[in-house]
Amino acid sequence: MEMAFIIPLLAIMIAGIVEIGWFANRYLTLLEVTRVGARAGTVLTGEFSPLSWNELASAHPVVHLQAYGLSEAEIPAEARQYRDCNLVTTRTGFYNFIACTMVNSFEPLRLAGRAPTSTDSAVKLIRDRQGNVIDTIPFPDDIVISVFATQAINNANPSSITLPSLTAQPRQYQLAAALYSRTYNFEAIAASAGRFRPGPQVIVVGRYPKRANECNVYNDGGTRIVIPGQDPFDYIPNNTRDAILVSGQPRFIELEGMDPNPQHQQQAEAQLGFVWTAQKLRRDIENAGRRALCWGSDFDSADVEQLINLPTFIDDDPPGVAPWNLRRAAIPSNGIVIVEMFWQHEPLLRFPFVEPIIAAFGDVNNIVISVWASFPVPSAEPNIIYGLP
């Protein structure tokens, strides 16, 4: 009788341990794959840097069909060529090099569903105990790669910055001079008033690929419409590439990369980052009740700025140390690659007593593992100077 009571409990515990271990193994494998991809991006320069990317390959063929309304014949050939790892020697760029490195790194695992160059959808068939199909679920498996140009700024009036003596405190003078070169009063520009908090911080001043960094295509009752969006390169949102006068000479304070159309907010874009299979559809973006037709990254510019500027990322100096925040003032501008992977996990045992426990936390037939990794990309580092000491 004791064995009759204990054996089922032991079986459930063992099955649960096996399932957790199976999940953890997949999770850690995918996490390491994203790190491998992100690390690969740190050393890509020159013709392989994100700034030299062929923008015709940015949007996935599915995005061209479903968001832009093109026919198969109108899809740029590069959209498929740069997603074919067999052509990596002749069609190589920053994003497909990373994606192919990742695909080759997590075998025997593979991305299920749609092939990277295909527009044909694939779904997972859900069957009952008798083998009958009772439901279908689209595969979410995808690789998404984004590069952010982050600029250290000091949102203050430049006249409030004074330089110490060159001889008295040389280190302090250097920090002050560096701070001065990135000090600008953004509140004086109506378009950006309230956009940034006062003082030193890091902001996103660009996102690559250039033609896959916004989501402004929406479904309005079955009709595709474009609603004005915000180009990440236009971080001072006034539809122009802003410049200031330094010693009588104009100096651009926004990176090159804005959409070429002067009314760039009408430029249709439906991707956030470079997507590999276009199976990860964004479902959280709405406008006036319209759902966005948008694929790709879960990170937008505000998310990246919030992560970098968190107090736990770099502490504030104690009050009274200096008239400015020396630590935050010392944060460098940088390029950052964020590699995300989405993968549908399949339980190993399908043990009938374990599945209800899993179902309490989500759909047992649609367990999606989402992982990401980030590394610096020196080739995408911005070099914006607002003033000179």
Image: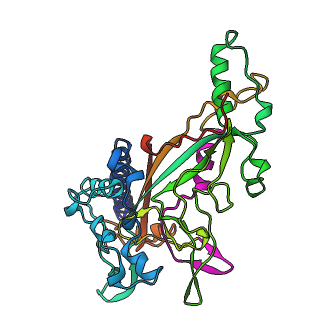
Q: Is residue 158 left or right of residue 360?
A: right
Count of residue discs? 0
Q: Is residue 194 above or below residue 121?
A: above
Residue, x 39% and y 83% (percent of image)? 136
Q: Quadrant of residue 17?
A: bottom left
Assign the N terminus to one quadrant of the image.
bottom left
Q: Is residue 293 magenta?
A: yes
By what rule are the colours in the image chosen? Answer: rainbow
Closer-to-camera residue (366/123): 123
Assign the C terminus to one quadrant of the image.
top right
Q: Is residue 340 above or below residue 216?
A: above
Closer-to-camera residue (88/133): 88
Residue, x 66% and y 26% (percent of image)? 177
> Can residue 169 be seen at all in this image of the molecule?
yes
Closer-to-camera residue (125/203): 203
Q: Is residue 20 above or below residue 363?
A: above
Outermost residue on the top side: it is 167
* Part of the protein shown in magenta: 285-311
Picture coordinates of residue 382, whole percent (x, y): 53, 43
Q: Is residue 50 magenta?
A: no
Q: Is residue 144 left or right of residue 157?
A: left
Q: Quadrant of residue 279?
A: bottom left
Picture coordinates of residue 10, whole percent (x, y): 36, 58
Picture coordinates of residue 103, whole percent (x, y): 27, 58
Q: Is residue 127 left or right of residue 216?
A: left
Picture coordinates of residue 291, whole percent (x, y): 59, 79
Q: Quadrant of residue 22?
A: bottom left
